[in-house]
Image (spheres, rainbow, N blue to C red):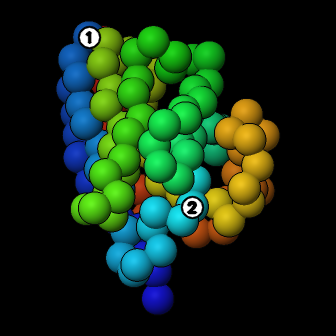
């Protein structure tokens, strides 16, 4: 059974950086586009970024573009989210997710397109 496990969250000050990891079990990781979402208290789950199967294409939400970088290492079955210049409004639980839908990345910006989710990792940015 395929599982996704996030790590790397924590408490940082505004302006700091964090790198999140998403480790996938199983042998099919490289076959699927993978995404990051986040959910703040009292808010809906929000799209952050998505990366293509091979890692050459990426798509970001406007709120993180230029600050966050999504990447993946298929040999290690791991996806990453490098978060720079963190802001208090980035505070949320961050989730990685898999989609089986082979659409263009710009069409994969809602949670309903994803069928497998990790348990989440908390990121808290203090001002």
Percent of width and height locating residue 33: 58, 53
Does any portion of residue 83 appear in the rendered image? yes
> Picture coordinates of residue 114 (x, y %)?
67, 60
Question: Residue at label 1?
Answer: 15
Is 34 situated above or below 124?
below
* Tag 2 secondary structure: loop
Read off the residue under disc 2. 32
The image quarter containing residue 41 is: top right
The residue shown at (58%, 69%) is 116
- For the point 57% across and 17% down, the residue is 63
Which residue in the rendered view is the most extreme toward the bottom?
A: 1
Bin the neighbour count of mark 2 within 10 Å (Cα to Cα): few under 14, some 14-19, many 20 and up: some
What x and y, as percent, mark residue 65? 52, 16
User: Closest to the observer: 118 or 40?
Assistant: 118
Specify the quadrant of the image occupied by residue 37.
top right
Q: Is residue 70 above or below residue 17?
A: below
Q: Nearer the viewer, mark 2 or mark 1?
A: 2
């Amino acid at each position: 059974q395929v599982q996704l496990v996030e790590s790397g969250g924590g408490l940082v000050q505004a302006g700091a950086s964090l790198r999140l990891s998403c480790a996938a079990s199983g042998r099919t990781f490289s076959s699927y586009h993978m995404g990051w979402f986040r959910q703040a208290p009292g808010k809906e789950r929000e799209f952050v970024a998505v990366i293509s199967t091979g890692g050459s294409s990426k798509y970001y939400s406007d709120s993180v573009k230029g600050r966050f970088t999504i990447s993946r290492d298929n040999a290690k079955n791991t996806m990453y989210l490098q978060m720079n210049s963190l802001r208090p409004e980035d505070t949320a639980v961050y989730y990685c997710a898999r989609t089986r839908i082979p659409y263009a990345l710009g069409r994969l910006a809602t949670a309903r397109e994803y069928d497998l989710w990790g348990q989440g990792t908390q990121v808290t940015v203090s001002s």
